[in-house]
Image (cartoon, rainbow, N blue to C red):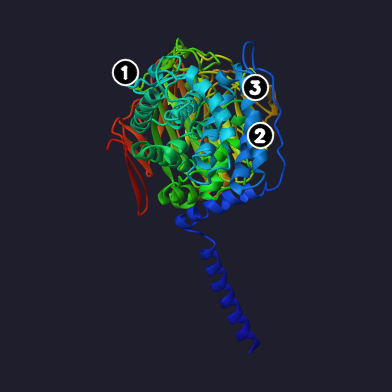
């Protein structure tokens, strides 16, 4: 009798466990339905707390305004929380006025690219939602506060917006002032202030420094933004490739276009955000971004910030990661009506279901380098002029539930061929599934441990990568292969090959010419704003010949019997170097050739790498032909078509 009861209990426990497991896996629609609760929890975690101002910092260089981005973010985060929760409204108004007065009293901070436009679109959003003319909770921001906020907003648009900046017939929106993220923040502010103030009696007849009315600026920025969105679908979404911080900043003003723009503007903003989150979702594990990138400066090469960048967005939209603290940068996303489509949520969350696949993307980067003035009020400023028709970069990633390995494949071009936002601190390597953000990063170290340009070129097929330091670099020191000390086994050297094990994958590193050392080292440096950083603990492979080709191979454990078999397979792949041509048959059976003299295009199974492919997005989940403007997002039975060309 007791045996029967025991069996019954075991069977019940099994079905209860299975039911609980199924119930614990929410559908994409259920994840989206929890967005507001997640946002509400972050705001309410700050309820009742007084304002804590971030420190104002001195100018980043001579002739610039104070560096007060963090201070302004602390102000708008506090104000947004108070306005959202309907608490401390007098203090919220006072804080916004205090922030505005600092800019008015220090006018260089208004036009400086590193302070004003980072927070200004959030202030305009708060006015739209809580100001005297608001559509959500009118009157929480008073008329007196509104007047002061518009005063410093007007100065920025008056000085920094001109009709020629919104030209798109010739530029196709690929003339970029300062850098990609600065450019988008800049035009977001001009569009939104013009929209908000153009019909107000005190601004209706005022003229900007180009002698145009705000109504004229509003019209051209509307047209520009629609063209901008279409071009990102047609030719490539990010010049600052897969850069966690810069890309999340690039898009943060687009929520305002979505929520407050006319129907055509709002529709294009929504599609561009859908495209961005599909682009992000298919190439990440546990919220950690994989694939080749640029502007991955300093410590960001070796770890991903889980408090800022895309991490808060991953939590709010996809319930991936941990709840963030309230931060001014993310207020627009938190308060926006925008939600990604269910198919994107499915792609983001279902790492196992995505399976093993390749991603190929055509990315702009070639062009004429523009002026690097730190001020945005320079009509004589020469913008970065991207040459999008010549190709130049094939972003390639091999994605498996166990890892993502990727690189930006480029020709071995001189530095002057690239705009700096493309060639700055390029990144390649593998991120693994597992705790502690384990990764392997084969790149030449930046001599200042922060920034280098045009450091390497490469070829990759599946989980096999060959790379080499470029002699046409700027600021690159020795070639190295950095490996996380946490989340990976201690590297071992066997017969001239370095082997390492991750939670669900194996990796091998081979230097194609000469000997090498393995050292354990922490890299230290100083960021632009003066703060210190230290890389996580890591092991570094240092070739004796800094221009030797380096091979990185990665394979999932479920493809092999054990580590010993992986080592045997790698050892059987004997490279050859004839004259300057490095030839290698990979563990996946592909044959790669790589000209170490930089003269010939690398080949994969006899075919030269195509740096200008016919598709701008090419993967099982994200597809679009170059210049077509119609993007398909698909996973299983879910599908969404983004038609940027329709009206």
In the image, 443: left or right of 75?
A: left
**Place of residue 73 in the rendered image (x, y in percent of width and height, measured from the top left):** 62, 33
Quick check: 409 above or below 125?
above
Q: Are marks 1 and 2 in contact (CB under 8 Å)?
A: no
Q: Is 424 or 125 nearer to us in this picture?
A: 125
Between tags 1 and 2, which lies in front? 2
Per the model, the C-alpha gap separating discs 3 and 1 is: 35 Å
Q: Residue at x 40, y 41 (%)?
A: 270
The mark nearer the N terminus, 3 or 1, is 3
Per the model, the C-alpha gap separating discs 3 and 2 is: 18 Å
In the image, 238: left or right of 628?
A: right
Res 389 visible: yes
**Place of residue 93 in the rendered image (x, y in percent of width and height, measured from the top left):** 63, 37
Q: Residue at x 68, y 39 (%)?
A: 91
- Give the secondary structure at mark 3: loop
Question: Mark 1: few, some, or many residues within 10 Å (few <14, many ≥20)?
Answer: few
Number of labels in the image equals: 3
> Which numbered marker is on residue 170?
1
**Place of residue 365 in the rendered image (x, y in percent of width and height, measured from the top left):** 42, 22
Quick check: 603 above or below 127?
above
The mark nearer the N terminus, 3 or 2, is 3
Per the model, the C-alpha gap separating discs 1 and 2 is: 43 Å
The mark nearer the N terminus, 1 or 2, is 2
Q: Residue at x 64, y 39 (%)?
A: 92
Q: Quadrant of the N terminus?
A: bottom right
- Give the secondary structure at mark 2: helix
Quick check: 389 above or below 349?
above
Between tags 3 and 1, which lies in front? 3
> Which numbered marker is on residue 67?
3
Res 70 visible: no
Q: Which residue is mark 2?
A: 95
Question: Mark 2: few, some, or many residues within 10 Å (few <14, many ≥20)?
Answer: many
């Amino acid at each position: 009798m007791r045996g029967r009861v025991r069996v019954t209990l075991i069977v019940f426990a099994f079905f209860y466990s299975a039911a609980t497991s199924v119930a614990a896996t929410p559908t994409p629609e259920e994840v989206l339905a929890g967005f507001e609760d997640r946002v509400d929890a972050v705001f309410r975690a700050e309820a009742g707390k007084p304002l804590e101002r971030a420190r104002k910092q001195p100018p980043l260089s001579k002739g610039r305004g104070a560096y007060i981005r963090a201070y302004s973010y602390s102000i708008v985060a506090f104000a947004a929380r108070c306005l959202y929760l309907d608490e401390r409204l007098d203090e919220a108004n006072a804080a916004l006025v205090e922030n505005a007065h600092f800019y008015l009293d220090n006018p260089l901070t208004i036009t400086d690219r590193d302070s004003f436009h980072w927070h200004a679109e959030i202030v305009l959003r708060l006015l739209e939602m809580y100001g005297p003319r608001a559509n959500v909770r009118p009157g929480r921001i008073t008329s007196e506060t509104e007047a002061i906020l518009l005063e410093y907003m007007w100065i920025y648009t008056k000085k920094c917006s001109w009709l020629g900046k919104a030209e798109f017939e010739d530029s196709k929106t690929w003339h970029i002032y300062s850098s990609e993220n600065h450019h988008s923040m800049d035009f977001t502010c001009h569009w939104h202030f013009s929209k908000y103030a153009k019909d107000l009696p005190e601004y209706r007849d005022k003229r900007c420094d180009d002698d145009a009315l705000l109504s004229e600026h509003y019209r051209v920025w509307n047209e520009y933004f629609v063209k901008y969105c279409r071009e990102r679908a047609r030719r490539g979404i990010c010049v600052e490739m897969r850069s966690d911080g810069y890309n999340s900043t690039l898009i943060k003003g687009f929520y305002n276009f979505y929520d407050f723009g006319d129907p055509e503007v709002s529709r294009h903003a929504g599609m561009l955000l859908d495209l961005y989150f599909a682009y992000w979702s298919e190439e990440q594990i546990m919220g950690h971004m994989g694939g080749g990138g640029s502007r991955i400066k300093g410590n960001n090469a070796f770890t991903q910030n889980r408090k800022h960048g895309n991490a808060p967005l991953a939590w709010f939209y996809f319930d991936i990661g941990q709840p963030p603290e309230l931060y001014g940068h993310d207020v627009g996303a938190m308060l926006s009506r925008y939600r990604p489509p269910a198919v994107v949520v499915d792609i983001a969350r279902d790492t196992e279901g995505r399976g093993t696949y390749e991603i190929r993307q055509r990315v702009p980067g070639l062009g004429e380098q523009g002026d690097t003035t730190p001020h945005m009020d320079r009509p004589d400023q020469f913008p970065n002029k991207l040459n999008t028709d010549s190709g130049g970069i094939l972003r390639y990633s091999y994605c498996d539930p166990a890892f993502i390995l990727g690189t930006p494949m480029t020709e071995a071009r001189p530095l002057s061929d690239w705009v700096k936002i493309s060639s700055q601190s390029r990144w390649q390597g593998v991120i693994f599934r597992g705790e502690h953000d384990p990764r392997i990063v084969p790149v030449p170290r930046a001599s200042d441990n922060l920034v280098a340009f045009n450091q390497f070129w490469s070829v990759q097929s599946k989980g096999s990568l060959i790379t080499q330091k470029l002699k046409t670099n700027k600021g690159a020191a020795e070639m190295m292969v950095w490996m996380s000390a946490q989340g990976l086994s201690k590297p071992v050297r066997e017969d001239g090959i370095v082997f390492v094990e991750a939670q669900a994958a194996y990796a091998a590193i081979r230097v194609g010419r000469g000997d090498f050392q393995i050292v354990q080292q922490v890299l230290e440096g100083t960021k632009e704003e003066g703060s210190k950083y230290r890389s996580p603990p890591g092991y570094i492979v240092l070739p004796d010949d800094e221009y030797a080709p380096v091979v990185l191979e990665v394979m999932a454990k479920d493809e092999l019997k054990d580590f010993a078999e992986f080592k045997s397979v790698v050892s059987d792949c004997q490279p050859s170097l004839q004259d300057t041509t490095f030839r290698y048959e990979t563990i996946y059976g592909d044959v790669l050739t790589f000209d170490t003299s930089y003269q010939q295009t690398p080949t994969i199974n006899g075919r030269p790498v195509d740096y200008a492919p016919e598709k701008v997005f090419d993967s099982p989940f994200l597809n679009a032909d170059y210049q077509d403007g119609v993007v398909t997002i698909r996973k299983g039975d879910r599908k969404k078509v983004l038609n940027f060309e329709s009206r």
